Image (tube, rainbow, N blue to C red):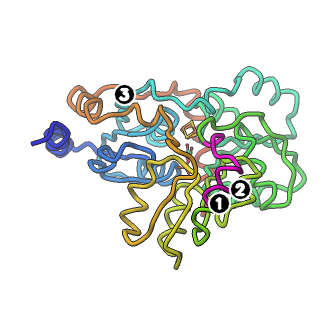
C-alpha cells in the first residue's frame, strides 16, 4: 500500500471515531479533497460549517476560511491543520487604516471580501464572497458610498455588473494576477472551440475575454452544464479535481502553467492526520471581535437568500 493511502485510511478512521467533519476548498491537493466530507467554494464552506451536525470541524483551507467557521460557529471546535496557511491578499489589509477610514467616513458602507482577517470583518458592514458579491452589492442602499476591501479586481467586476461605482482597496490576489491576456489569447488560438472560464480575482482585461466569470463553485457549475467539451480555466489548478469528476468527458486547459496557491497547497495529509489526532490547532477569535465579525457574515448570509 502507498504511504498516502495508509495516511488516508488513518484519517478516515480517526475522523469517524472522533466525529470530526472535514471541510475542504477546491484548491486543496487532490488527496486532501479525496478525504474531505465536504468540498466547496468559500461561501459553501461557511454554510457547511454552520450546518454540520458534528461538534468538531476541520477546515482544509487558508486561515480566513477556518476563522470564518469559528466566527459563525462559536459552539463548535474548529481545527486548522496548518494555521500558517494564510492568504496574502487578506493579510495586505491595514486594519488601523480601515479603522481610521471608518471614523472619518461614517456614511460609507464597508464591504469586505471574506478573504480578510476577523479584525477587518469586525469593522465592516457586510461581507461577501465571489459567489454572492453581485447579489449583495445590488441590495445595498443606493444613497450610501461603498468602500470595497481588499480585492480591486473583484470590486471592478461587481461595479460593472451592478452599474455602481465603489471605492477600492488597492489589493489583489498574486495567484490570479499571473493570468494575463496573452495567456488567454495563446490558449484560445490553440483551443478555438474552448470556453474561457475565469475567477473574478483575475484582472479586468482578462475577465473581459472570458465566456464566464464566477467563483470556484460557479466555474464548476458552469462547466457541468455547458454543452462544450473544452474549457480554458483561469483559476487555481486544484479545481481540476472537481471539474474532472463532474465532466469526465471534457478537456480542461489551465490558462497558465502551474497556477498554484502555495498557501492552499501547504496543507498535507500528514498535517491533517496530526491535527485530527491531537485536535490542534483550535482556531479561536476573541469574543469582542467575533461578535462584530459575526454580524457582517450573518448579514452576508441573509442578503444571499
Ligand atoms: P471562492 O470563494 O471562489 O472559492 O474563492 C476563494 C479564493 O480564495 C479564491 O482565490
Ligand atoms: Fe488568497 Fe489568492 Fe490563494 Fe485565494 S488563491 S487564497 S485569494 S492567495
Seen from this angle, which residue lies furthest front?
190
The residue range painted magenta reads 176-188
Question: Closest to the observer: 78 or 191?
Answer: 191
N-term mark: 1 or 3: 1
Q: Is disc 2 placed on a helix, strand or loop?
A: helix
Dot 2 or dot 3, earlier in sequence: 2
Q: Which residue is mark 1?
A: 213
Answer whether residue 238 is magenta in the image.
no
Q: Report how far apart the C-alphas of labels 1 and 2 lie in the structure.
A: 7 Å
Residue for badge 3: 282
Q: Name the magenta segment's main secondary structure.
A: helix
At a point 78% along the width and 50% down the height, the residue shown is 156
Mark 1 in CB contact with mark 2 (< 8 angstroms) = yes
Find residue 295 and name its label: none
**Disc 1 + disc 3, Cβ < 8 Å:** no
Extreme residue in the right direction:
143
The quadrant of the image that shows the C terminus is bottom right
Q: Farthest residue in the bottom direction? A: 227
- Residue placed under numbered mark 2 in the picture: 207
Left-right relation of 183 to 160: left
Amino acid at each position: 500500500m502507498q504511504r498516502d493511502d495508509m495516511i488516508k485510511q488513518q484519517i478516515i478512521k480517526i475522523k469517524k471515531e472522533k466525529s470530526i467533519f472535514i471541510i475542504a476548498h477546491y484548491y486543496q491537493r487532490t488527496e486532501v479533497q479525496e478525504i474531505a466530507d465536504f468540498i466547496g467554494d468559500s461561501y459553501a464552506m461557511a454554510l457547511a460549517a454552520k450546518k454540520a451536525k458534528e461538534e468538531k470541524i476541520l477546515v482544509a483551507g487558508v486561515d480566513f476560511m477556518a476563522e470564518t467557521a469559528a466566527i459563525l460557529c462559536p459552539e463548535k471546535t474548529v481545527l486548522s491543520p496548518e494555521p500558517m496557511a494564510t492568504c496574502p491578499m487578506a493579510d495586505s489589509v491595514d486594519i488601523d487604516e480601515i479603522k481610521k477610514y471608518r471614523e472619518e467616513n461614517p456614511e460609507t458602507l464597508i464591504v469586505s471580501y471574506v478573504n480578510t482577517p476577523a479584525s477587518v470583518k469586525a469593522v465592516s458592514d457586510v461581507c461577501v464572497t465571489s459567489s454572492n458579491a453581485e447579489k449583495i452589492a445590488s441590495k445595498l442602499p443606493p444613497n450610501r458610498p461603498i468602500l470595497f476591501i481588499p480585492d480591486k479586481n473583484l470590486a471592478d467586476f461587481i461595479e460593472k455588473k451592478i452599474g455602481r461605482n465603489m471605492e477600492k482597496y488597492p489589493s489583489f490576489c498574486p495567484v490570479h494576477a499571473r493570468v494575463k491576456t496573452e495567456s488567454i489569447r495563446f490558449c484560445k488560438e490553440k483551443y478555438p472551440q474552448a470556453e474561457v472560464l475565469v475567477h473574478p480575482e483575475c484582472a479586468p482585461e482578462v475577465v473581459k475575454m472570458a465566456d464566464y466569470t464566477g467563483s470556484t463553485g460557479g466555474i464548476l457549475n458552469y462547466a457541468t452544464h455547458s454543452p462544450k467539451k473544452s474549457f480554458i480555466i483561469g483559476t487555481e489548478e486544484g479545481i481540476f479535481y472537481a471539474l474532472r469528476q463532474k465532466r469526465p468527458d471534457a478537456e480542461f486547459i489551465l490558462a497558465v502553467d502551474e497556477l498554484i496557491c502555495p498557501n492552499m497547497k501547504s496543507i498535507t495529509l500528514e498535517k491533517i492526520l496530526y491535527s485530527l489526532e491531537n485536535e490542534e490547532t483550535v482556531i479561536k477569535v476573541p469574543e469582542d471581535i467575533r461578535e462584530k465579525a459575526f454580524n457582517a457574515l450573518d448579514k452576508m448570509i441573509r442578503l444571499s437568500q
